Image: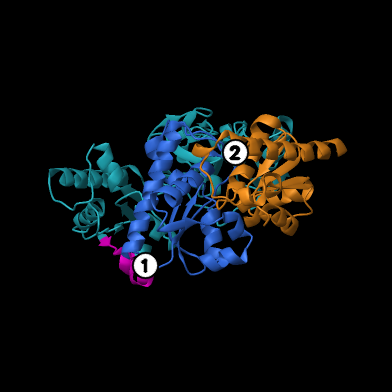
Amino acid sequence: MSKIKIVPCSGIGKVFGLLARESVLMVTEEKCPDECETLCLAHVVTGDDEVVGKINGENCITMDGCAKYCAKKSVEETGGIVVKSHKVPDYIKAHRGEEHGTGTYLTDDGWKYAEELAEIMVEDIKEIKAGVN
Amino acid sequence: MSDSLCVLPCNGLDKCAGDLSRRVAQEMAKSEEVELICPVLLNQNKSRYEKALEAGSLTVIDGCNTRCASKLAADLELAIKEKVNVSEVAKSLDIKLGIEIREDQDTQAVIQAVLGKINSSAAEQVESEFVEPESVEYNTFSHGKFIFKVPKANYYFNENDCWVTVSGNMARVGVSDYVQQNLSDILYVDPPEIGDEFEQFDDLGSIESSKAVFEIVSPVAGTVVAVNAGLSDAPEQVNESPYEKGWLVEVRLSDFEEDQDLLHDCPAYFEFLKRKVEQIDV
Amino acid sequence: MLGNRIGVISCSGEECLGGTISRLAVRKMMEELKPGMVSTLCLPLFIAGDGGEREFAEKYPTIAVDGCSKCCAKRAIEKYSSAVAGSIDVAEIIGEAKALEKPLSTRYITDLHMEYVNQTAAKTCEIFDEILAKQ
């Protein structure tokens, strides 16, 4: 079974883009490096042949920063199977009042939130591996 | 209000919260007016439930924050009257559900609280008497990378960038496209209480993004008869559709003719907004 | 939201260090070097085309800051709007091999990485100033 692809939006304007990026890096680089890998969204959206080949027909998880769903839409258009799609604000209710940082850096609360998002994706990976979806 | 009700639980098999969504739905389905919708069958064969969904309003019960049931309903473009999230209700009761499926006092308390929430909401929210327009046409102008849109007709604005659109004696209130673009991703909507009476230019709740809190300054006087319940789970609708799906409050008007004297119609607001954007170099 | 009429698009690539550098360089420009003077455009949104990003890049000079030699940001501007007003390839500044190293969390940014960010941001500012001088 090939590695699950996880693609964040990495939006540059706001902290949600950085939260998406950092949470995905936590999963692909530290928590589950053997089960998953990230792909460059810029390559996906520009239709890079190598990335399109890697993504087409594969299980993918997307983490978007806003309701524009750039990562999800781009992966779907490239032929990836988006098994789990999340966006950072989906889980924000429990974090009301916290300061998470900016598009450049995360605060301690921001890192905790990124960790929570990463754990959600770790659970996704376990489910996908177990064939739940 | 519709006589019948359809209830769509997430029915999650692998976690306690999903199991509770199923148990709440089964409890509700003891009433003859309630049709229980199986999410798996709905996903496979939507037509199986088409009649029931046409005849009744839809309540969705999600087990956890993955919100599979809500997402399924959204994917199938079903109109949701109300959403309840079992995990959030449990959290408000300070009850940890965990993974293990169980029947005990805690889970029973969560079930009762979810049922109570659904019942009280049904009692509060009257069926909307507001008649939505079939479509809204827009004028747009751009400034830098931002494109602002304003309806061509049938909306009235105050200078705080809040709008009202009227249908008989009822009206809906919301915020302009300019507000949502300035705030960026809207994360929380704090609506007023149903039944609240208010004067023109009174506060009518607020919306909050990661950038700021925006107080809704009411363009009209009246009484709150409904709030857009869908925004508690999907506040981004204010960003995506500020003049239509992202409406905030439904009101019974006191005296719209008088209120109108202090409001801009669409062409006037369009010009007002263009000047404002130019002056502050948005 | 917008002071001047010069845009910058970073690739923000997730697969290599160059993407992290390009992203941080553009953020540095936006926050420290040219505050209120640049309009940052989000590359995926630019390509999706449902905001005002493309229209902006058609009307106003826009700089691409790419993390590797695939130059996704530059190619996107050329494809969807018009010729780029200037472009930076981080790989040319820090070397191809370095740029293609593993992507980096901002938690692990070292002084050396910040030096790469500073160099890239300074180079982008040079282009920015040249464009501004011509306006």
Chain A drawn in what color?
blue
Q: In the rendering, which numbered label is found on residue B196?
A: none
For the residue carrying disc 1, how many other residues have a C-alpha within 10 Å: few (<14), some (14-19), or many (20+)? few
A33 or C74, which is in the foreground? A33
Outermost residue toward the right in this view: C134
Residue drawn 43% across the image and 63% down it: B76
Chain C drawn in what color?
orange
A37 or B142, which is in the foreground? A37
Q: Is residue C27 magenta?
A: no
Q: Which residue is mark 1?
A: B43
Q: Chain of mark 2?
A: C
Which chain is represented by cyan in the image?
B
From mark 1 to mark 2, how far is it between C-alphas?
49 Å
B221 relative to B153 in the view: left or right:
left
As helix, strand or loop, the secondary structure at mark 1 comes to helix
Query: Which segment is the magenta one?
Result: B35-52
Residue drawn 46% across the image and 67% down it: A58
Is residue C58 in view from this perspective?
A: yes
Q: How many marks?
A: 2
